[in-house]
Amino acid sequence: MTKIIFIFLSLSFFLSCSDKDKGKSKSYRYQIEGVSLNNKVKCIVSVRIGNIYERDEMKELSDIIKNQVNCISDHIYISYLQPGMKNEGGSWAVVEYNSGFNIDIIGKTKQNFESLKSYMIDGGKEYLGHWVDLGKQDDLVYRIKKNNTGYSLELCSPSEQNESELCRLRKTKHKEDEIFIDADEPSQYYKINKKGNLDVFDNYGWVVTYQKIK
């Protein structure tokens, strides 16, 4: 009976999480994807958010989620994911309520993201796009370049003078989608989705989505 109640509660949170918290001046884009109770000691909540929020915003959002979930335990652990991240691939940020409030932003902060956007060099029409991995706090930018022999996936960074070529790509078509296949590892391929973000796949399926910055 207890397991059935937990499943019902999780579903209720999922359906109601898009509503605005009426007592707050700011609304947040988020979705509660799972709630579990570890030995009735720690409540674990998985949340997917739609933006990169600052620390003070994360505190406000976490308080909203804490009140919404209403766990029987005061020890609450919240794992935050960005849209292009897998549930099992690690968190963008983690928040813990346990005799206080603690937050650890593991992925890119808003400052990281904006600085990389301003860094971008205009490469002209030869570049199909520039993307970053929001799940990692680094200064790496991925880009696909069209050259005389086809396409290549490059990696560049404000801290490095020269870009590096990760792999050569072969462009093909699957239904209505343009696919860029790794010429040396055909099981790995890339797709620019309708939002302009870069989806990464391997032989097991979708791996991650890189966020477009230009």
Image: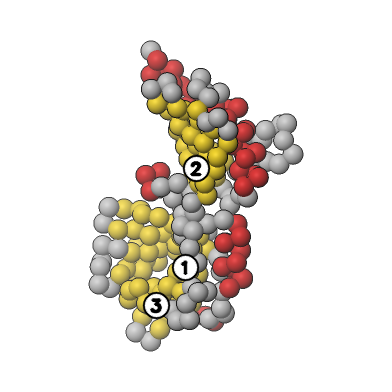
The residue sitting at 37% across, 44% down in the picture is: 88
Q: Amino acid at mark 3?
A: Ser
Q: CA distance from mark 1 to mark 3?
A: 11 Å
Q: Which mark is residue 94?
A: 2
Locate residue 99, reporting x and y percent.
55, 30
Q: Residues within 10 Å of mark 1 (few under 14, many from 20)?
A: some
Give left or right: position of 49 versus 144. Answer: right
Q: Which residue is mark 1?
A: 140
* Label whose residue precedes the other's in the sequence (1 or 3): 1
Q: Amino acid at mark 2?
A: Val
Nearest to the eye among marks 3 and 2: give it: 2
The residue at the far bottom in this view is 148
Is residue 152 something one can see in this rendering?
A: no
Q: Which residue is mark 3?
A: 164
Q: Residues within 10 Å of mark 3 (few under 14, many from 20)?
A: few
* Label whose residue precedes the other's in the sequence (1 or 2): 2
Q: CA distance from mark 3 to mark 2?
A: 32 Å
Within the image, what quadrant is residue 169 found in?
A: bottom left
Nearer to us in this view, 55 or 88: 55
Q: Amino acid at mark 1?
A: Leu
